Amino acid sequence: TMTTTRQHDLLHRLRPAASRRTQLRAVALLWGVVGTALGGLGLFWCARAGGLPAAELTLLGVAAGAAKGWFVLRRAAERIARRIAEREDGSCLGGALSWPTWLLVVLMMATGIALRHSSIPRMVLGPLYVAIGVALLVGSRRLLLVLRHWNDSSPAA
């Protein structure tokens, strides 16, 4: 119908179009910023434990995060990079991540909010937040490494 066509045209003009390189940079930036914020908050909570427990809690979080980053988020980053490489240049920025991935992001945000408002001691949450932050930073680094190897004419993940 005419109304549906106009709505589609309007949505198409308003969508945040971006090159594949920009899409990959945006995901890397998102992961990097969120990883830094969560890791920093986790470090703050670990430091409040004071002395040796603070160091042990921090190291536990860093080790767990590095392992998750290497074994899980590195592969997820490569999958996202392949998805973006297969997309048309100038496609919608939000489509850099699939719908299931966006749903997972929302679920993780809700879980983080629930954890922060729970009665779980910050000394327990600290290493968890450090781990999540480090894992996201490892994934962000992988995205940036993939981006560095793309050439301008035909990106390949």
Image (cartoon, rainbow, N blue to C red):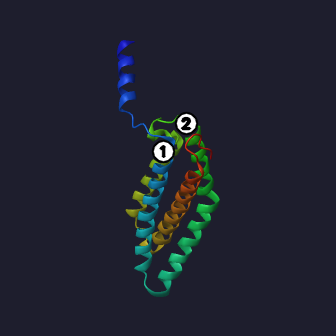
- Closer to the chain start, of discs 2 and 1, is 1
The part of the image, by quadrant, that contains residue 59 is bottom right
What residue do we see at 42% from left, 69% from top? 40
**Is disc 2 in contact with disc 1, using a CB cutoff of under 8 Å?**
yes
Q: Is residue 121 above or below residue 27?
A: below
What residue do we see at 55% from left, 51% from top? 147
Where is residue 146 drawn, in percent x and y? 59, 52
Q: Is residue 98 above or below residue 115?
A: above
For this view, does 116 lie left or right of residue 104? left
Cα–Cα span, label 2 and label 1: 10 Å
Where is residue 42 drawn, in percent x and y? 44, 70
Where is residue 155 drawn, in percent x and y? 59, 43
Q: Amino acid at mark 2?
A: Arg
| SS of the residue under disc 2 | loop
What residue do we see at 58% from left, 48% from top? 150
What residue do we see at 37% from left, 29% from top? 13
Which circle marks residue 147 in the picture? Answer: none
Q: Is residue 122 above or below residue 56?
A: above
Please tell me which residue lies in front, 76 or 25.
25
Please tell me which residue lies in front, 42 or 111.
42
Report crowding for label 2: few under 14, some 14 to 19, many 20 or more residues within 10 A (C-alpha): some
Q: Is residue 7 above or below residue 135?
A: above
| SS of the residue under disc 1 | helix
Where is residue 23 drawn, in percent x and y? 48, 45
> Label 2 belongs to which residue?
87
> Label 1 belongs to which residue?
23
Question: How many callouts does the rendering have?
Answer: 2
User: Which quadrant of the rendered structure holds the N terminus?
Assistant: top left
The part of the image, by quadrant, that contains residue 34 is bottom left
Q: Amino acid at mark 1?
A: Gln
